């Protein structure tokens, strides 16, 4: 009798398991996980506020990780995306300013911090473009987060899947 109950329990466990996947307007399902990339329009950091805040269309999962990259130029015709935090230093080696970010399940904040930001060269304050990448927690530990191109390849996302957002 015990063997029959054990056998039924095992069969029941296998028959009740199933694969589920959900798709939301906030992202794209790839390999059974949800990944999203947002690109900002030109962002201006002004003395009235050296930060921007973006509220996600839907709350991200508690295990998700948010990565932020800044467009810092181009190399051989390819965009160069710098991983945040991104620090800039004076000639003497002390930190001048940094781009940084924090996030919750509902939003991400990107901000400048440092010495006398009002005198910072406008090239570092005005017309900045960022990409916000939402990565499933199970995948985030396997990625080289500093490599934007590698992250996009691992997520199996391409440029036409990036969602543009306005500020």
Image (cartoon, rainbow, N blue to C red):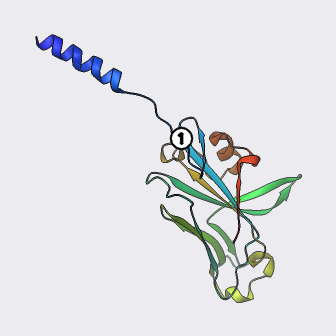
Q: For residue 157, what is the image quadrant?
A: top right
Q: Position of residue 100 (x, y in %)?
A: 60, 70
Q: Nearer the viewer, residue 128 or 142?
A: 128
**Extreme-right residue of the structure:** 76
Q: Residue at x 71, y 47 (%)?
A: 161
In the picture of the structure, the residue carrying the numbered disc 1 is 33
- In the picture, measured across the screen, residue 73 lies left or right of residue 38, that is right
Q: In the image, residue 81 lies at what x, y percent? A: 73, 58
- Residue 46 to residue 25: above or below: below
Q: In the figure, 38 relative to 86: above or below?
A: above
- The quarter in which the N terminus is drawn is top left
Quarter in which the C terminus is drawn: bottom right
Disc 1 is placed on an element classified as strand
What x and y, as percent, mark residue 71? 76, 62
- Residues 152 and 16: in front is 16
Tell me what residue is drawn at x 56 percent, y 48 percent.
24
> Going by the image, does 81 lie left or right of 6?
right
- In x, y percent, where is residue 12? 28, 21
Q: In the rendered image of this protein, does residue 44 appear above or below residue 72?
A: below
User: Could you say which quadrant of the image residue 150 lies in?
Assistant: top right
The 10 Å Cα crowd at callout 1, few under 14, some 14 to 19, many 20 or more, is some
């Amino acid at each position: 009798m015990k063997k029959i109950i054990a056998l039924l329990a095992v069969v029941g466990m296998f028959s009740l398991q199933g694969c589920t996947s959900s798709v939301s307007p906030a992202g794209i399902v790839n390999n059974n996980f949800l990944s999203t990339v947002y690109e900002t329009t030109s962002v201006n950091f002004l003395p009235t506020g050296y930060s921007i805040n973006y509220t996600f269309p839907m709350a991200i999962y508690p295990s998700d990780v948010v990565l932020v990259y800044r467009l810092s130029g181009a190399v051989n015709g390819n965009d160069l995306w710098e991983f945040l935090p991104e620090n800039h230093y004076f000639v003497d080696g002390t930190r001048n300013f940094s781009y940084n970010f924090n996030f919750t399940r509902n939003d991400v904040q990107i901000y400048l911090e440092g010495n006398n930001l009002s005198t910072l060269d406008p090239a570092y304050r005005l017309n900045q473009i960022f990409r916000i990448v939402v990565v499933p927690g199970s995948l985030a530990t396997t990625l080289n987060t500093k490599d934007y191109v590698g992250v996009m390849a691992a997520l199996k996302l391409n440029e036409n899947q990036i969602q543009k957002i306005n500020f």
